[in-house]
Amino acid sequence: MAHRQGNKISEIVELVPDVIELIVNKLPSYCLSSCRLVCKTWNNVILSSKYHPSISAASNFFLAHVYSESRDRPNSHRFRNLHCLELDPDHVEGVRSVASFNLKRKYFKRSFISIINSCNGLLAFVVTKKTNSWLSPNSVVILNPITNEYFELPKDKYKGNWFTCCYGFGFCPKTKQYKVVRSSTIRDRNSIIHNYKTEIFAFGTRPEWTQIESPTCSFNGCHGVYLNGGLHWIGQNNLGPDVIYRLNMEDEKYEQIPFPNDDGYFPCIGIFNGAIHLTLSMEGYKYRVWKMKEDGSWIKAFSVIVPDVNKNILSFSKSTVEPIKICKDGKILCLWAGAELVLYNPTTKKMEKLIDDTTARDISVHNIDCFTFNALPHILTGKLGKF
């Protein structure tokens, strides 16, 4: 009897990892970090090769970095938290925060944080320290939000020149390595001549900023977006019309992709539903959204007019519409003016606001389509077989 009981106990123990795996496969991704702390068995199951952590494209979750003014302290700005938001039609704001965590104090104390872009579940952001000098070197930091692990790159170096920088964070599918790209517009204080420089920090092969051939234009201070082995920015073709510059992460060469035939202005690009989308502003707060096809041609996705424009928000943020996610009911969640979440209904071709207030804010939204618990340096240098 005791032997049988021992066998039963042994059989139960053997079944536990399978049961745990069934459980964790049904949990939202933001819960897994806490689940690793339950016990050694839970931790091993989550980290095991049997469990491939990924997030469905139909997931209702996304990350948001919010920069806003405190209502209690009007001159105090809050941007220390990253929030995991879930679409929730029953919530008063249309979304609810299901998890959040503070960025490291060294990065937000007396600093301004700007998210660059996301790539394979990792986030890159720029930290600019507030100093008495009008020039302040930037720090580029890579964050794995599922483990709260950071990797800080060498700082920018100023040599008496005024310049602006925009960045991009990408992945080379062939080598499995990550790269950070820095595009600088440089002007000597005593000259009106501008110079343009592109540098790459390649993890694992070139642990320093290395200069490559650069387009003779600026990217208007906007960071790049990553898709399918390439980083994309908006720039001007030799002072001509706007084009999209795509940097191949393997050969590190730029190519130009023409805009669609459209007379809109204030262009903005982003990744939506697995494709590059371009938003152009029109008169009267009307916006036209274009989708890039695989061959580089364009097809119009939708046009929309934003209702009840809040001028207070427009004075704080850029005027554009960025598609974020397709909801279960077919509506498209969008970010308007970098400040308000709105819903576009493809059936009625109308847009509705999820919240109506006058709070000045700037929201940076990022879809996280996969994640990993592996050590961040190993991920960045391509030492892992998969992520």
Image (tube, rainbow, N blue to C red):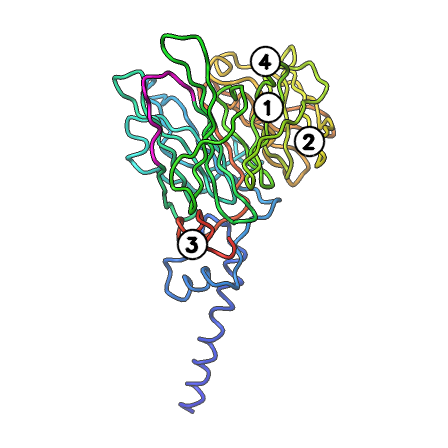
Per the image, the residue denoted by label 3 is 374
Per the image, the residue denoted by label 1 is 321
Q: Position of residue 328 (x, y in %)?
A: 65, 41
Q: In the image, is residue 360 above or below residue 102?
A: above
Name the N-terminal-most of marks 4 and 1: 4
Q: Report the Cα–Cα distance between label 4 and label 1.
A: 26 Å
Q: Residues within 10 Å of mark 2 (few under 14, many from 20)?
A: some
Give the number of the mark in front: 3 or 4.
4
Q: Which residue in the rendered view is the most extreme toward the left?
A: 132
Per the image, the residue denoted by label 2 is 292
Q: Residues within 10 Å of mark 3 (few under 14, many from 20)?
A: some
Name the N-terminal-most of marks 2 and 1: 2
Q: Secondary structure at mark 2?
A: strand
Give the number of the mark in front: 4 or 2.
4
Q: Report the Cα–Cα distance between label 4 and label 2.
A: 23 Å
Q: Report the Cα–Cα distance between label 3 and label 4.
A: 45 Å
Name the N-terminal-most of marks 4 and 2: 4
Give the number of the mark in front: 4 or 1.
4
Say which amino acid is labelled 1. Val
Per the image, the residue denoted by label 4 is 239
Q: Position of residue 283 (x, y in %)?
A: 65, 10
Which residue range is magenta in the image? 154-164
Magenta stretch: helix, strand or loop mostly: loop
Say which amino acid is labelled 2. Met
Q: Quadrant of the N terminus?
A: bottom left
Say which amino acid is labelled 4. Leu
Q: Report the Cα–Cα distance between label 3 and label 2.
A: 34 Å
